[in-house]
Image (tube, helix red, strand yellow):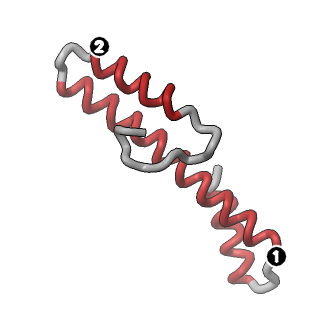
Amino acid sequence: MKTVGLPAPSPLFPVEAFDEINQRVSRRTGGSKISWHTFASAWNAVVYRLTAAHQHADRLRLLLATPGTSSEARYVEDHELFCSR
């Protein structure tokens, strides 16, 4: 994931395909900085969101392994659950 500088969100993430799409679009923007910037911003956001979702899901799995009983613990579980969607 050359463009973002982050590791793949998961081992199953198609890194080569992601980078290839980025390169193809880069070549097809015809030198338009506006078009390229718009695409690149959105394309990077895909990885940011997937990375965040995987991190929240991992955290939720850890929390649910020993479910909390306090209101604060349940709040943290709910937070991780709804952020991972």
Q: Which residue is mark 2?
A: 28
Q: With 41 as the anchor, is 49 left or right in this view?
A: right
**Residue at x 28% of width, y 16% of height:** 27
- Residue 2 is marked as none
The answer to whether residue 55 is above or below residue 24 is below
The answer to whether residue 83 is above or below residue 48 is below
**Residue at x 67% of width, y 57% of height:** 57
How far across and down, in percent of the image, does residue 49 sit?
51, 47
The quarter of the displayed image where residue 77 is located: bottom right
The quarter of the displayed image where residue 3 is located: top left
Crowding at dot 2, Cα within 10 Å, few <14 / some 14-19 / many 20+, comes out as: few
**Residue at x 38% of width, y 26% of height:** 22
Label 1's element? loop
Camera-nearest label, 1 or 2? 2
Frontmost residue, 59 versus 42: 59
How far across and down, in percent of the image, does residue 31 sit?
17, 18
**Residue at x 82% of width, y 76% of height:** 67
Q: Which residue type does callout 2 highlight?
A: Arg
Q: Which residue type does callout 1 highlight?
A: Pro
Sequence order check: which comes first, mark 1 or mark 2?
2
In the picture, the quarter occupied by the N terminus is top left
Q: Which residue is mark 1?
A: 67
Mark 1–mark 2 CB contact (< 8 Å) = no
The quarter of the displayed image where residue 52 is located: bottom right
Q: With 4 as the anchor, is 85 left or right in this view?
A: right
Q: With 34 as the anchor, is 4 left or right in this view?
A: right
